[in-house]
Image (cartoon, rainbow, N blue to C red):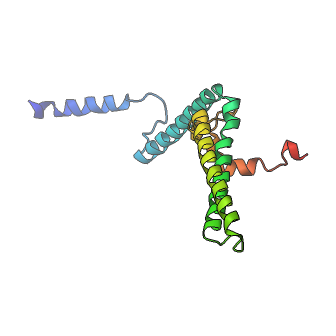
Amino acid sequence: MKAERAADLEAALAVVGEWTRAEPGFRKTTPQEFEEWLAYWKAEFEEEQAERERQARAAGYDEGRHQSRLAPLEQQSFLTARIAERTGLQDRTCIPAMEERRRAAEIAKLDAEVAETETNIIALQREVGDSETVVDVNGGFSAAIGHTGRTRHRGPRSEDR
């Protein structure tokens, strides 16, 4: 039976094949073209998604938190300098001719400043939270400004004018 109907089946498949797409000049895309098209649309979608996320973050901008994110960094730099100064006094590489009583007093003073600065850093970090999640007015992450931020904002600061 199949052999008898093989010619009919072949003719029917030929007709169906003609009508799979109706537009003139249609050609099937190659797998490579399809992958390129898919990659293009995926990149387009990811860009749009990133823009929507940035706009949502911008809506939650907090100027106080944005400004206060720098305070822990400033205190950390003070802490690093005080520890370096204390270490230099302790191992006598900083002011080697200093009198011992004065050296001990300076080390004690620096120990107190280090403890105070560490306390300040902890308090500021609690206030600000994770500084990596602080957003700027445009919804970008302040910590991610990096190289683009440094090149984008090369002009003089308003206080310098």
Instruction: State the residue at coordinates (57%, 41%).
Output: 122
Using the image as rendered, state which of residue 61 and residue 84 is in the foreground.
84
* x and y percentages locating residue 45 in the rendered image: 53, 34
* x and y percentages locating residue 36 in the rendered image: 48, 45
Q: Residue furthest bottom?
A: 97
Task: Give the quadrant of residue 11.
Answer: top left
Instruction: State the residue at coordinates (71%, 36%).
Output: 67
Task: Give the quadrant of residue 139.
Answer: top right
Quarter of the N terminus within the rendering: top left
In the rendered structure, the answer to whether residue 141 lies left or right of residue 3 reads: right
Instruction: State the residue at coordinates (48%, 42%).
Output: 39
Answer above or below: position of 42 versus 97. Answer: above
In the rendered structure, the answer to whether residue 138 lies left or right of residue 159 reads: left
* x and y percentages locating residue 115 in the rendered image: 60, 48
Q: Residue furthest right?
A: 161
Using the image as rendered, state which of residue 71 and residue 146 is in the foreground.
71
* x and y percentages locating residue 53 in the rendered image: 57, 31
Answer above or below: position of 61 versus 144. Answer: above
Quarter of the C terminus within the rendering: top right
